[in-house]
Image (cartoon, helix red, strand yellow):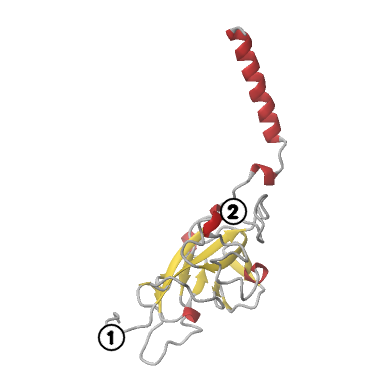
Amino acid sequence: MGRRNFTIAAASALVVLAGLWQGMSPLQARANTHVQHAAFTTIDPNVDSPPAGGQLCLNGNPGVNCNIYTDKQFVWLNGGPAAAALGDGTYFFAVLEPGGQGGGSSGDPNDGTAKNLSSPFDDYTNRTFTVSASAVLYGGSHDQDGNLIRLMPYGDTGNPGGVYIMAICSLADAPEAGIASLPGVNPSDCKYDAFKIQACASSCEP
């Protein structure tokens, strides 16, 4: 085949492939709707009272992004400060063991996966919420206080350091082809925030 004919054939093949790609469904094309801005965990002193002589958060900025908590029940999902609030859309949240956000054999945030600590207690539909104009709209059974949602109930982590991962995942593309567990999100469509549960000892900062 001459160089000119080869070039024409190659160009024709590219045109055909482009047409096939444009004709694919969103699932086949694996659309990726990433979560806008950041995901945070925080405390809610308006609802929770610390143990006598204790506190809810041991470090971080408690009003926005706490990192170490004195009890599992004191951890709340926070859409973030106004400048970094989640974008409009529908999401679900889950608490994972470290590694549960990686996808593949290591697990992912979908229900029923090995490192999802939330799904044994309720399914993702009870952990689904909507953000509209920076307001969090939620109708499930988890406690809600304004734009905050309590993460409990969830199981205990197997991590020896007491580390947990909160996932907030966009449902815009779910279910995606090839993902069997509901709701079928790609782990890359989620934002993650690590936190730790640690009982306050005498060395804890005030």
Q: Position of residue 142 (x, y in %)?
A: 60, 77
- Which image quadrant for residue 195? bottom left
Give how far across and how far down residue 134 sits, in percent: 56, 63
Would you say 62 lies left or right of 34 here?
left
Residue 35 appears in the rendering: no
Q: Residue furthest front?
A: 105
Query: Which comes before the other along the chain, label 2 or label 1?
Result: 2
Residue type marked 1? Ser
**C-beta proximity under 8 Å, tags 2 and 1:** no
Observer-nearest of 188 and 64:
188
Residue at image location 67% in from the left, 24% down from the top:
15
Residue flagged by tag 2: what amino acid is it?
Asn
The quarter holding residue 172 reads bottom right
5 shown above or below 104 = above
Q: Name above or below for residue 18 compared with residue 193.
A: above
Q: Along the horizontal axis of the image, is 137 left or right of 74?
A: right
Residue ID for mark 2: 186
- Residue 122 x %, y %: 64, 74
Residue in the image at 46% along x and 82% along y: 45
Residue picked out by circle 1: 202
Position of 100 with respect to 7 (left or right) is: left
- Vertical position of residue 94 compared to residue 56: above or below: above
> Nearest the camera: 145 or 103?
103
